[in-house]
Amino acid sequence: MHTVAVSLTLLTVVDAQNHILRFHSPANSKSVSSPFTKFGFGEKKANAFNLKAIRDFVKTYNEINNNEWFFAENGTSTSTFTNDEIETQVAYDSKGNRMYILRIYKENKLAKDIRDRVKREYYDAIITLVKELHTYDGLFIYVHLQDKDNLKVIRITNGIMELVETINKNE
């Protein structure tokens, strides 16, 4: 009779102090995950996604593994994640083209040259929030400010800084 050896890729670990025998299989391990799980797609099937959007996201955000995807009935999709205290939202149209990237963060993440420029112009205000919008038309930076009496939003586009909204807190 011939003996057939079967390798099940099981790892046996013996805990000598407690005399416990454990079996670990990569198939049951939570550390083994598909690329779809790693990039926030969860248990959805690969054909549920636009491949062009997936390729763009993976190429651009290779190190991100805490994102979540949202899908609309019209075929658009959005991925959201937080990395280094920056909230990011990446949106794709139904054909997989990137529509925009929105990044939201606090003053400490704002580029120093932009922060200095804003502080020189609005020296009595504090920066409460920054929104960076990357679209086909370029980069738009919205800086939210607060002073004693007002809330303000300024927009910086192509080096031009302009006040786009003022709300009086006392009214």
Image (spheres, helix red, strand yellow):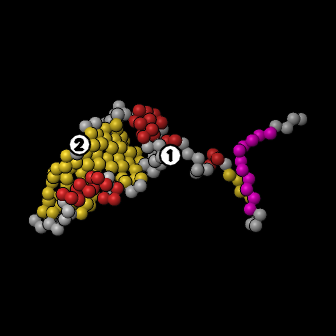
**Where the N terminus falls, by quadrant?**
top right
Q: Disc 1 designates what residue? A: 38
- Region in magenta: 5-15
Q: Quadrant of residue 48 in the image?
A: top left
Query: Is the Cβ of the residue at disc 2 closer than 8 Å to that at disc 1?
Result: no
How many numbered dots are placed on residues in this image?
2
Could one spot residue 94 in this view of the protein? Answer: yes
Tell whether 37 sits left or right of 107.
right
Q: Give the residue furthest to the left.
A: 171
Q: Find out whether residue 19 is within the magenta segment.
A: no
Q: Disc 2 designates what residue? A: 158
Give the secondary structure at mark 2.
loop
- What is the distance, in whole Å, between disc 2 and disc 1 at their CAs? 36 Å
**Where the C terminus falls, by quadrant?**
bottom left
Disc 2 residue crowd, few under 14, some 14–19, many 20+, Cα 10 Å: few
Give the secondary structure at mark 1.
helix
Tell whether 128 sits left or right of 163.
right
Q: Nearer the viewer, residue 17 or 166?
A: 166
Disc 1 residue crowd, few under 14, some 14–19, many 20+, Cα 10 Å: some
State the residue at coordinates (64%, 47%).
26
Q: Which callout, 2 or 1, points to the residue nearer the camera?
A: 2
Q: Quadrant of residue 59 in the image?
A: top left
Three-letter amino acid code at disc 1? Lys
Residue 3: x and y in percent read 85, 38
Residue 14: x and y in percent read 75, 59
State the residue at coordinates (33%, 44%).
101
